[in-house]
């Protein structure tokens, strides 16, 4: 079976990433890692991107207790870098899945 | 995350700062370098699927800016095992014959074996990334510059204040990906 090029796999992975995050466009996107994997006898490219997202972390409902309200975390947004791995079929170029890449 | 111009500045800074000390390569990157010197037709094949000859040229050009390559016994063991899986027969023997001075524990001017004897592993790194990567981190903490394409290793190095570059960033900046 003919294989797509690595550069093509990266381009397809990036396109899928933007599609999946169309409502929250990735900021400061970088290509972080590429691996060739065989899963269930299928040859795939695992393309990992890192980017920044904004995420709401809490919503505070006002109470009647002003002291408690002061102690609660106020709603805010934190910027954090996330890593996502997109798996692309190395033969067909089809999107297989997206995984969260856990890093610490 | 680094932009292309930031990365360029960073690379130039590291070349200036670590030219004499050398560049510490992790197993994947060292494997690419050695195979490119041995027989570049193997690039893109088994164990080196993700690279092209242009990546090897980029790597050779960059590492050529440093006086020597830094390595260690765990890294060389990994490289040896990877080569054992990708080459066979006469080619395998030729590779090891040609690369013996790299693996030999006698340091030459262009290669330096960093000892793992007496190093103290960072427990959290060891439990998460294993012995080879933990030993790389411990050695690199002694003010060495690390080049890797392993994201976990790269991020761990960055978090510990180690001078490190992700080779994938270089490839992307060079428009090879």
Image (cartoon, helix red, strand yellow):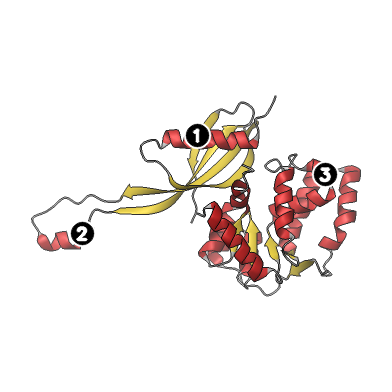
Q: Which residue has dot 2 on it?
A: A72
Residue marked by disc 1: A15
Seen from the viewer's position, the closer of residues B79 and A41 is: B79
The residue located at (48%, 33%) in the rendering is A16
Residue B134 visible? The answer is no
For marks 2 and 1, give the one nearer the viewer. Answer: 1
Any part of residue B162 in sight: yes
Q: Quadrant of residue B9?
A: bottom right
User: Could you give the CA–CA distance between mark 3 and mark 2, rounded to whole angstroms?
Assistant: 62 Å
* Element under disc 2: loop
The percent position of residue B52, horizontal first and vertical second, equals 71, 42
Question: Pointer 3: what residue?
Answer: B87
Tell me the element at label 1: helix
Coordinates of residue A47 in the picture (x, y in percent): 56, 41
Residue sticking out furthest to the bottom: B118
Pinpoint the chain carrying mark 1.
A
């Amino acid at each position: 079976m003919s294989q797509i090029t690595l550069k093509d796999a990266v381009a397809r992975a990036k396109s899928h990433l933007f599609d999946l995050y169309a409502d929250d466009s990735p900021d400061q996107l970088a290509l972080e890692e590429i691996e060739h994997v065989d899963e269930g006898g299928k040859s795939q490219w695992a393309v990992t991107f890192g980017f920044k997202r904004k995420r709401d972390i809490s919503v505070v409902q006002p109470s009647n207790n002003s002291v408690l309200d002061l102690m609660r975390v106020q709603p805010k947004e934190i910027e954090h870098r996330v890593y996502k791995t997109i798996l692309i079929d190395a033969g067909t170029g089809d999107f297989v899945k997206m995984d969260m890449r856990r890093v610490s | 995350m680094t932009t292309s111009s930031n990365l360029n500045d960073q690379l130039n800074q590291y070349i200036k700062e670590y030219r004499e000390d050398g560049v510490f390569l992790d197993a994947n990157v060292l494997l690419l370098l050695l195979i490119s010197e041995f027989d570049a037709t193997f690039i893109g094949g088994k164990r080196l699927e993700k690279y092209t000859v242009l990546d090897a040229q980029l790597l050779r050009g960059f590492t050529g800016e440093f006086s020597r390559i830094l390595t260690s016994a765990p890294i060389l063991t990994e490289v040896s095992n990877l080569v054992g899986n990708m080459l066979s027969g006469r080619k395998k023997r030729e590779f090891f014959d040609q690369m013996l001075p790299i693996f030999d524990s006698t340091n030459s001017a262009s290669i330096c074996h960093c000892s793992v004897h007496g190093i103290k592993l960072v427990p959290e790194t060891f439990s998460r990334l294993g012995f080879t990567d933990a030993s790389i981190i411990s050695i690199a903490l002694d003010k060495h510059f690390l080049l890797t394409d392993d994201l976990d290793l790269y991020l761990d190095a960055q978090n510990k204040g180690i001078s490190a570059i992700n080779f994938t960033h270089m490839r992307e900046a060079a428009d090879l990906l």
